[in-house]
Image (tube, coloured by chain):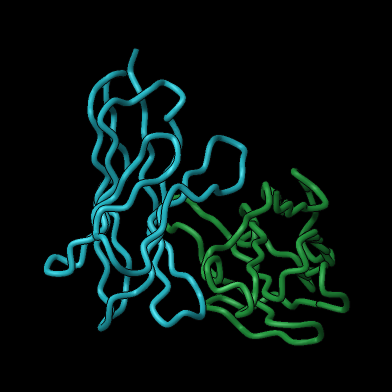
Chain colours: A green, B cyan
Amino acid sequence: DVKVTQSSRYLVKRTGEKVFLECVQDMDHENMFWYRQDPGLGLRLIYFSYDVKMKEKGDIPEGYSVSREKKERFSLILESASTNQTSMYLCASRPGQGFMSSYNEQFFGPGTRLTVL
Amino acid sequence: AQSVTQPDIHITVSEGASLELRCNYSYGATPYLFWYVQSPGQGLQLLLKYFSGDTLVQGIKGFEAEFKRSQSSFNLRKPSVHWSDAAEYFCAVDPNNNDMRFGAGTRLTVKP
């Protein structure tokens, strides 16, 4: 089974802190994604990565950055946390084009609920 | 604007009753279509997906979905709901085989 793990289930930080959210997948997937989930808004894409060292902005990248130094790990960084970044953060991964039958399916981690005070 | 719409924010059904969750999308071509389920405190689990072919798709946990091109819809159904089906359900589309767009979700409550 594909496993996507996230470093913390719950996190409480203070305004202005630098926050790191870590995501690791064990299936050698090329593609990885970071979403935030808010009530009534569904999931919104923050950043994604098609390969190591590569990153692409999603729909709401402002206030966030990402790092992908190794294929299995994709980190989301809040440079200076603000209260409006209080949310549930979900990481996902997906195989690359070499696995056509499951190319479009994303596999999700359990999420990190971040509270910024 | 391109979008995915789940018109029902919250649905309550009795255990054993049938269920239909609605999903409409507005994209030019037929996108890839998905339904995910999220149990409380969990990540998202794929229920089923549609790429092409038979428009009635079978998924896990007894769910099915029907793609209707003329209505730009991909509604999720289950003939008899179980208490364990209480969760939030997300419809998602991938319009260009590149990235996924999600609806706002429908929260399902199951009455005993």
Q: Position of residue B106 (x, y in %)?
A: 36, 45
Describe residue A35's horizontal placement relative to residue B22 as left or right: right
Describe residue A3's horizontal placement relative to residue B43 as left or right: right
Q: Position of residue A26 (x, y in %)?
A: 80, 59
Nearest to the observer: residue A99 or residue B76: A99
Q: Residue furthest left?
A: B70
Residue A107 to residue B110: above or below = below
Res. A47 visible in picture: no
**Residue drawn at point x = 67 percent, y = 74 percent:** A31
Q: Residue furthest top?
A: B112
**Residue drawn at point x = 81 percent, y = 86 percent:** A53
**Residue drawn at point x = 42 percent, y = 52 percent:** B48
Describe residue A73's horizontal placement relative to residue B110 as left or right: right
Residue B86 to residue B70: above or below = above
Res. A45 visible in picture: yes
Q: Position of residue A2 (x, y in %)?
A: 70, 53
